[in-house]
């Protein structure tokens, strides 16, 4: 992962999009969380899909979900993305992986990002998906 320009933060008073990051590698999760916060996003973190599902059932719905594919727990990132597509189809989904092929996420994700990813590029991808239309 490389640091890059994260674009300008949100202007004062502008609503901030919320991103749920699901990543079992704590350092990767921390780096991505910090990059998104620096870009003006609200961030919720989860260490696995089970924790993410609990967040989705108890918190206001985030605007975007970023999930790694390979994680411990009852459901992996692709399973989480499938559940989200069925239950919260308005939620934008970005799947990341250093192992899975992009076509594994074709039907269930708005974007696929291969690891190691460029932090700036991923932040720009989130911004593009959450931009008002």
Image (cartoon, grey):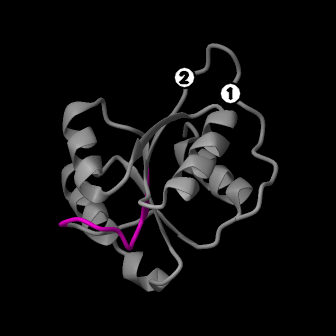
Q: Residue at x 73, y 54 (%)?
A: 120
Residue 27 lies in the magenta-colored region: no
Label 2 residue SS: loop
State whether residue 106 appears in this view. Answer: no
Residue behind mark 1 = 10
Q: Residue at x 63, y 41 (%)?
A: 34
- Near mark 1 (Cα within 10 A), the count class, few <14, some 14-19 or many ≥20, is some
Q: Is residue 32 above or below residue 96?
A: above
Q: Which residues are magenta?
A: 65-74
Which residue is at the front of the view, 72 or 16?
72
Which residue is the extreme one toward the right? 5
The quadrant in which residue 83 appears is bottom left
Contact? badges 2 and 1 (CB < 8 Å): yes
Which residue is at the front of the view, 47 or 115?
47
Residue 43 appears at what percent x and percent y?
Answer: 49, 37
Which residue is at the front of the view, 82 or 96?
96
Residue 42 appears at what percent x and percent y?
Answer: 52, 31
Q: Quadrant of the C terminus?
A: top right
Q: Residue at x 77, y 55 (%)?
A: 3
Which residue is at the front of the view, 72 or 75?
72
Label disc, if present, on residue 15 of the rendered structure: 2
Which residue is the extreme one toward the front? 26
State whether residue 89 appears in this view. Answer: yes
Structural distance between the alpha carbons of marks 2 and 1: 8 Å
């Amino acid at each position: 992962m490389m640091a890059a320009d994260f674009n300008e933060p949100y202007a004062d008073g502008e609503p901030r999009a919320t991103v749920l990051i699901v990543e079992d590698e704590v350092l990767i999760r921390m780096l991505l969380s910090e990059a998104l916060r620096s870009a003006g996003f609200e961030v919720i973190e989860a260490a696995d899909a089970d924790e993410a599902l609990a967040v989705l059932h108890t918190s206001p719905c985030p605007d975007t979900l970023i999930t790694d594919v390979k994680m411990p727990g009852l459901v992996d990132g692709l399973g989480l993305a499938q559940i989200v597509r069925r239950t919260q189809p308005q939620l934008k989904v970005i799947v990341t992986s250093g192992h899975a092929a992009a076509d594994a996420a074709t039907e269930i994700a708005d974007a696929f990002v291969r690891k190691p990813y460029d932090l700036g590029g991923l932040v720009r991808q989130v911004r593009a998906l959450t931009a008002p239309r």
